[in-house]
Amino acid sequence: MKKKVLSALLIAAMALSMTACGSGNGDSGSSGGDSAPVSDDAEDTEDAEDAEPAGDADSGDLITVGYAQVGAESDWRTANTESFKSTFTEENGYKLIFDDAQQKQENQIKAIRSFIQQEVDYIVVAPVVETGWETVLEEAKEAGIPVILSDRMMDVSDDSLFEAWVGGNFVQEGETCGDWIAEYLEDQGRGDEEINMVTIQGTIGASAQVGRTEGMANKLKEHSNWKMLDMQSGEFTQAKGQEVMESFLKSYDDIDVVICENDNEAFGAIDAIKAAGKSCGPDGDIIVVSFDSVKAAFESMIAGDLNATFECNPLHGPRVAEIIQKLEAGESVDKIQYVDESYFDTSMDLESILEERAY
Ligand code: GZL
């Protein structure tokens, strides 16, 4: 909206300067070298206000942010959305236009095009998958609208198409998970045992899936006694996670470890394990680990079902607002900005930690 006010001012100022050029200085009215600079005196501004109103003047001073969110597939996503909605408020100087793409790239692309038509000041995207964004990012660049990426990454040939990316280090998350499994098995006296694993992956092509799978693969190379029996996508949802685990249990008799690429998939996998008459968690047959570290994951560990969860901080709102403020002030911003992350397991004082958790 701020953008529209600015363009109205520019139109009015140019009209004013062209009138000035046409009267008395013999100029043909060309606004070439003679056009007056955009003046900020009251007269110009009054003329600007006479120009086509640029929408609700009250929102003229707000920074309008178009936010193309993936969907509402998980507890993590809910927390991530809430972080943006509680940051980009009118009292904080923003007008947020929010779009839930229901995990469909075509919906996100439509949303970005709509933001361009609305002439927002900034576009923020949490891209559902990494590829297929060049064209629409070029359109945003053409329109002069800066794009900021949150959460997942885009794979583009020209990284000037976005200003910055804020998110988790997914490969690191996967490697931390692998190291934790090695230490846990060692502590159980199973360090040299043949270990059968399965992975319930996230949405295929999403940065979180790509990175977590890669990080865990790096650790598999370090343990010749580990065997990854199978990997299938659970789409980061609980329902699909349960479905995939049911199929794994039918295919494989001896699964020792299940790696779920988000907490909600783990909740589904745990339901499937119990329905099959098996047990999981620190005292069970099957070790279950996951990613995100949402509150429900703490409750699952406290209940003795989940062994560990590897954090992926969803609170990107304040970080993106900080980037926008810097851009507004004409300052440069770091292209890649990782959020702080940790992990949690049943050896910790989970009840106390849970009390302090923001998500
Ligand atoms: C991670 C994010 C993933 C979460 C899932 O940054 O992209 O998507 O791990 C969410 O819970 O669905």
Image (cartoon, grey):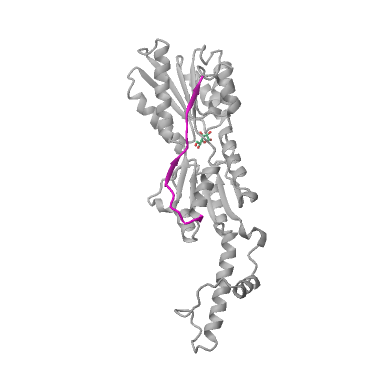
Q: Residue 121 versus residue 349: which sits nearer the camera?
A: 349
User: What kind of secondary structure does the magenta stretch mostly adopt?
Assistant: loop
The residue depicted at 55 percent of the width and 41 percent of the height is: 103
Residue at far top of view? 189
Which residue does the image show at 43% across and 34% down from the upper left? 170
In magenta segment, residue 194: no
Q: Quadrant of the N terminus?
A: bottom right
| Number of marks in the rendered image | 0
Q: Quick check: 99 above or below 289?
A: below
**Residue nearest the viewer, comparing 195 with 283:** 283
Work out whether residue 234 or residue 286 is closer to the camera in this orientation and state it: 286
Q: Magenta residues, as a range?
A: 328-345
Q: Position of residue 263 (x, y in %)?
A: 54, 28
Q: Position of residue 147 (x, y in %)?
A: 49, 52
Res 125 visible: no
Find out whether residue 342 is within the magenta segment. yes
Residue in the picture at 40% in, 10% down: 189
Residue 326 seen in the figure: yes
Residue 42: percent from left, percent from top: 62, 73
Q: Is residue 311 above or below residue 167?
A: above
Quarter of the figure with the C terminus: top right
Q: Position of residue 303 (x, y in %)?
A: 59, 17
Residue at the outermost front position:
41
Q: Nearer the viewer, residue 148 or 34?
A: 34
